Each structure stands twice: as structure tokens, then as C-alpha cells.
Amino acid sequence: MTKNQKSHNIGITSNSVRFLLLSVALISLIIKTDFYDPFNSAKFLLLLILSSWILSHLINSYKVSHISMKSFEFKIVFIVLLFISSLLFSTFSSNNVFWGLIGETQRRNGLLAYTALSIIFLYTVRAINLSNVNGIYKTGILTGVIISSYGILQISGRDFVAWDNPHNSMISTLGNPNFASAFLAVVALIGIYGLFLKTLSRAFKILAFYLIATALFAILESGSRQGLFVIFFSTTFYLALYCYFKSKKVGTFITIIFIVIGLLVICGMLQKGPLTSLVYKQSVSVRGYYWRAGIEMFKSSPLTGVGIDRYGDYFKQFREASYALKYGFDITSNNAHNTFIQFFATAGFLTGVSYLVLIFTTIYSGIYLLKHCPTESRGVILGLFASWLGFQAQSLVSIDNIAISIWGWLLGGSILGLRAKHSSHISLKDNSVISNRASKKVEINLLQPVVFLLVLIPILFFSTSFYKAENNLYKLKGIANPATPENKEAVLFYAKQIIENSFSDPYYKYRSAIYLYDMGFTGESIKTVMDLTKKNSSNLDFLRGKLFIEEIKNNNLGIIAIREQISQLDPWNAENYLQLLKLYLANNELDKAKFIKDKILSFAPETEIAQSAKEMMD
């Protein structure tokens, strides 16, 4: 070792690297069938718990080896801290801090999740080197084999879980065919590139062949084409660079072909060109509406965004009138289906820019490594880089999902970690722990468990309460049936457990209120809905619940007030305007009724609703 290499004592052992990779695999694999959301919430809780252990080791490594302010790694840490700080600022600027912390129902992309992913990312930067990077390939292949095999089981109709699933049966452990398709594409890429590594054993290459075959079959059967798009984009990039390093002319030629085909694919997605019939899908074109709504959200609140993972609360306010006319007045979306736009729209300028800086730094670092690394290391780096680019390709058209995004952060962290070591003139294979520092050994051993306990205790407190809410709503869903009045007391018990739980998702409380009403507990239901609307005045679901209550009371003034509020949050809902028109006519408020009629005719003149509005005013 050189003098510089010896100074790179960061206190990371092979066991801690194995734990990091095992954590990533387990988070992708875990499901909890006794949860109301058996996929995202289970992964979210496990992510928080495992990242607390990783955080303790990360802090310990910084204690052992300080980062120079001039180093490349310091720049990465600074960008990540800016990203987390801006998310924190946006969270506490939101009108619902709880949702900012845990994220949207059945998404869980809040501050806590992104903080945990950032911890895994920073630890990967420190831990991964060319001596242990094969672990990423092996973990990706093994995880992919399990998830693709489960997908095949679902396709064959032999799933061991009876999911309440409105989608294609191939949801694997991700709960949605699109997510499953994107995930299988990313791990299939890891398997494809692993085949070219001399350092990967024959057994793992056999598993990689199996993974590639089963993943491609499952992706095709899922009906989701985004997995194929990810594989095409990444493998073409890999092939172009691989050929470029062999022959610049051949590489340049393939790159030109790649660009031409890529442009044709994009045109096809937009219903233009010869590839339209192959690549166009209705779900692709609808994303344009989601993206434009997200951009408008950012324009309305550029500093903080509309609130972390609060896209769904504001989509109808910022959607275009043509979306409502084309897809339905009540159809909505709770995500921009583009990770970059989502960050800008919901968390503001600093979050969006810091994330973009991180992305472009990773791209630059990948190119830098490929240019300067030893020839024998180029294959493993190119595989990581191409797999990471595949992940980024799906993030342009998809929702951030914990099971997929954790791989993006792992792959990106490994690229930046290798670059950081190269910039510090440290062997890309070196991450050693100097055993002769006996004077520090006790201090190091004490620091890690102390930090772990300090972080774990509040996380376990939160996780226990969150777990109970998920489990109680799952039980409540199964027994809340008016046809079984003998379950009334049990329904009341579980509903109260959820409503009185400070760490219950507000939407779970709302669902509990609906179940209470169905079982005859009208007073308890009304009180819960009214409390929720006071705290979440911009949530259309809660407002519709309050509207239902006012309609039961036959309170026309109250109904009008709520429908007017809905019209502000959902300005292109002609059905709501039609009901408001009826109410104004019943109250003999003719000027307001005429205004509403003109409003309907201004954006929905060819609809049956417009015809009804005309007839009412005649």
C-alpha cells in the first residue's frame, strides 16, 4: 500500500457491506399480507429500520476517517445534505406535515423515505470498491431470480397469496405490473452485464441466464412496455460504449443508429412515425398531462412546491380542461410520473436542482471512470453505469417506488464511490480497516451501537404505531360489512384504534369513518370526517365526505359552500358545476346560476352536462 492508501481507513468491514446489500434485497422482496398496503408500507418500514443501522456505521466511518473539504466525496455529501435539507424545509412548510414525512398513501415517498435512501447512498459511496462491487451484481441477480420466479408463478395462476388486485396478475412483490416490469428490467440489466464479467462465477452466470429469460417473459406478460424500453435504452448504450472502446468508428456508427432509433421510438410514443403501432400506448400520452400539471404546480410555488408527495391534492386544480373531458371529471393522479418533475412540483426549486446536480454528477463520474480506469475494470464500471442509466430512463416516465428507487441510489452511490476513490488517488480496490489502531478500537466499537440505539428507538416507536394502523385497517376492511351486524363492536374497536392513533395515515382515518358509517355508527363517522376536513381543507376526498354529511342533513347552504370550495380545487369538473347550478336555481340565485352555466359552456360545450345546463336555464 502507498501512504495515501493507508490513510484511507474508513472503518468499513466486509460484513457491513454484506449487510448493506442484504438490506437492499430484503426491502425489494418484503411484503406484509396483513397490511392494508402490503407492498409500499412494508418496504417503507423496513427501509427506516435498516437504514438506522447503516446510519450508525456511516457516522462511525466519518469519525474514523474525516472527509477533506476539498475532496470529491465532500462535494457529494454536501449535495445530499442540501437535498435532504430542502426536503425538510418543504415538509415543514406544508399544510400537512405528517403526509410530508411519510408520503402519499400507497406511495410512501416522503421525507423519511428519501432521508433513508440518502443514507444508503452515502454509505454506498464509502463502502463500495472494485474488491466488493461483485456483490452488487450477485445481489441483483439473486433478488431478480426470486422476484421474476414469483412473477412467473402469478402468471401461471399459482400465486400463494389471493391478492385484491385490479391489475394484470404479474405484480410480483411490487403490487403493480408497471413497477414490476421496471424493476425486472433493472435487475435483468445487472444480469446481462454480469455475464461479461470474468470475476463472476459460473453459478451466478447460470442464474443470470435464468433471470434474463424469466424477467423478459414476465415483462412481456405484464403488458407493461416500460421494462422493454428500459432494457433497450440501457443495452444500446452499453453496446455503443463497448464498441467505442474497441473501435471508435464502430462505436460512433452504433451511437448514430442508437440516436436514430431512439428518436423514432420517441416519435412513436407521440403517435408519429413508423413505430407508432409498436411503441404507442395510451398510458404514455396521458403522462403529458401529468407532466404539465406538475410544471404548473412548480410555477405556483417555486420555493417549496405544493408539499412533498402532495401532487394528488393539487392535480385537479392544475390539470388541463381537456384531461377532464377526455378521461373523466373524477379521474385523478397522485404523481407526476416523472421523478424530476415530481421533485420540483412537490418540494420546490432547491430539491429539484440538488437532485439534478446529483444525477449529472453521477453521469459525469461514470464517463470519467470509463476514460481513466484500468482496462480490466472497465467492464464492471460500464455495467454499473448502464444499469443506473436504465433506472434513470424508467424514472422519466414512472413513479418513484421504494423497491426500484433503492437500486437506483445503490448503483449511483457505487459509481460516485469509485470516482471518489479515484479522485483521492486511492486504489479502487482499497477500503481496508487498519487493525493496528488499537487506541481507537474501543471508541469505534462504542460509537456505532450508541448511534444505532439513539436512532432506532424513535424509529421503532413510530414503526410500531404505523404497523398497528396498517394491520388494524386490514382487519377492519375484512369485517366491515352491513350484512354482518354481529361485527359492529369489532368494527368500532378497530376504527377507534386507527382514528386515535397519532401515526395513522389521515386517509386511513377517513376509510375508518366510512366503515363506521356503513355499520351504523353515524355520529362517530361524522365527527371523524369533520375533524379531517378541518386539518386537510384541500383534500377532495375529505371534502366529498363532508359534502355527503351536509346532504344527509339536507343543508343547502352547507352543500353550496362545499361545492364552491370544490370548484376552486377542481375548476374543470363540469359535474360539480351542474350540481351547483341546480342549487343556485333552487335558491333563486339566477345570476350565479347563469355564471355557472356559462362556465360549463366555456370548456365543455359538447357534453351532455352542457345540454342539461342549457335546459335548466331555459
Image (cartoon, rainbow, N blue to C red):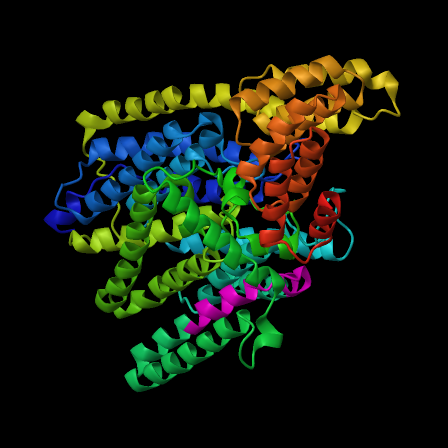
Is 501 displayed left or right of 383 in the figure?
A: right
Is 38 displayed left or right of 205 in the figure?
A: right
Q: Horizontal and vertical percent for residue 85? A: 30, 34
Start and end of the magenta stretch?
217-236
Q: Horizontal and vertical percent for residue 335? A: 52, 46
Q: Horizontal and vertical percent for residue 184? A: 56, 57
Of residues 417 and 478, the one nearer the viewer is 478
- In this orientation, does residue 542 appear? no
90 in relation to 183, above or below: above
Q: Which residue is drawn at 63% across and 23% down?
A: 509
- In this orientation, does residue 13 appear? yes
Q: Residue at x 26, y 43 (%)?
A: 79
State yes or no: residue 227 in magenta.
Answer: yes
Of residues 121 and 575, the one nearer the viewer is 575
Of residues 301 and 10, the one nearer the viewer is 301
524 in relation to 179, above or below: above
Q: Residue at x 34, y 74 (%)?
A: 241
Q: Horizontal and vertical percent for residue 582? A: 71, 36
Of residues 547 and 262, the one nearer the viewer is 547
User: Where on the picture, by quarter, is residue 122?
Assistant: top left
